[in-house]
Image (cartoon, rainbow, N blue to C red):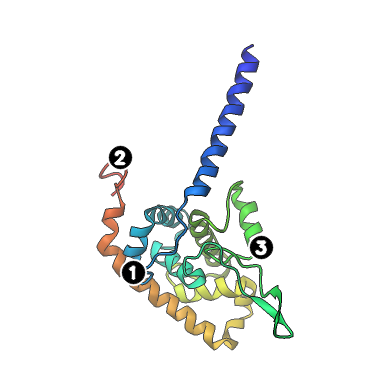
Amino acid sequence: MMKEFLLFKKKLATITLLGILLGGCIFTNSEPPSNQSNICSIFDAHPDWYNYALESEKKWGTSIAAQIAFIKQESSFRHDIRPPRNKLLGIIPWFRSSSAYGYAQAQDAVWSEYEEERGSLFSRRSHMKYATDFVGWYNKKSQSRLGISQTNIEHLYLAYHEGRGGYKRKTYLKKKLLRKTAKKVSRQTDIFQGQLQACEKKYKCRHFFQVWPICS
């Protein structure tokens, strides 16, 4: 009888967990922020994004401002975006230029590497929690394998865009537009950092279980 009861409890816990996860998928607000030029407005629209980015910063070292600047550049905060399809003969929809998908525009191969290493059963590219974690994880790899400082946003972005192999081969040197974009992401990070200093306090200690000064 006890064994059957424990088995029932285990099944009930599994069903409850699935319900919570499915509920989260249904009710997650995935609308892009209306004002994407101000990180305070972005976090006003999506307070949970601050928590996700903070967690990633603590784990991997990429600043909150840099994570959000990367994701803004990659997807404009659209959770399900993919590259447009190429056109065969100029009119017939054909294959996409890459497998990039989601907030961070992670491609299939590197996302599989991330999932295997992180061991996350429910991770998905269309959720900001995993997008921020992915950006931080990737930049940490770039730091350890390529020697790029976490504060060198321009070159972190070049490695992010070209892949670490491409960065080693310096493929970005032949891509003037990409180099301009990397500088743009670096400037955006600086802007976001300044804005965040003025408003970050209100995103801390906003839950009843967060007690000052532990969460300050």
Seen from the viewer's position, the closer of residues 4 and 154 is: 4
Q: Who's the residue at 65% across and 58% down the image?
A: 113
In the orientation shown, which residue stands out farthest toward the right? 89
Q: CA distance from mark 3 to mark 2?
A: 39 Å
**Image quadrant containing the N terminus:** top right
Query: Where on the picture, by quarter, is residue 92?
Result: bottom right
Q: Is residue 101 left or right of residue 20?
A: right
Mark 3 and mark 1 lie on one chain; the one further toward the N terminus is 1
Q: Who's the residue at 61% across and 28% down the image?
A: 11
Q: Amino acid at mark 2?
A: Phe
Query: What residue would you read off at disc 3?
Result: 108
Mark 1: secondary structure: loop
Query: What residue would you read off at disc 1?
Result: 38
On the image, the x and y values in percent for residue 163 come to: 61, 72
Q: Amino acid at mark 1?
A: Asn
Q: CA distance from mark 2 to mark 1?
A: 27 Å
On the image, the x and y values in percent for residue 72 come to: 45, 69
On the image, the x and y values in percent for residue 123 come to: 58, 51
Query: What residue would you read off at disc 2?
Result: 208
Q: Amino acid at mark 3?
A: Asp
Residue 214 vertical placement versus 195 (above, below): above
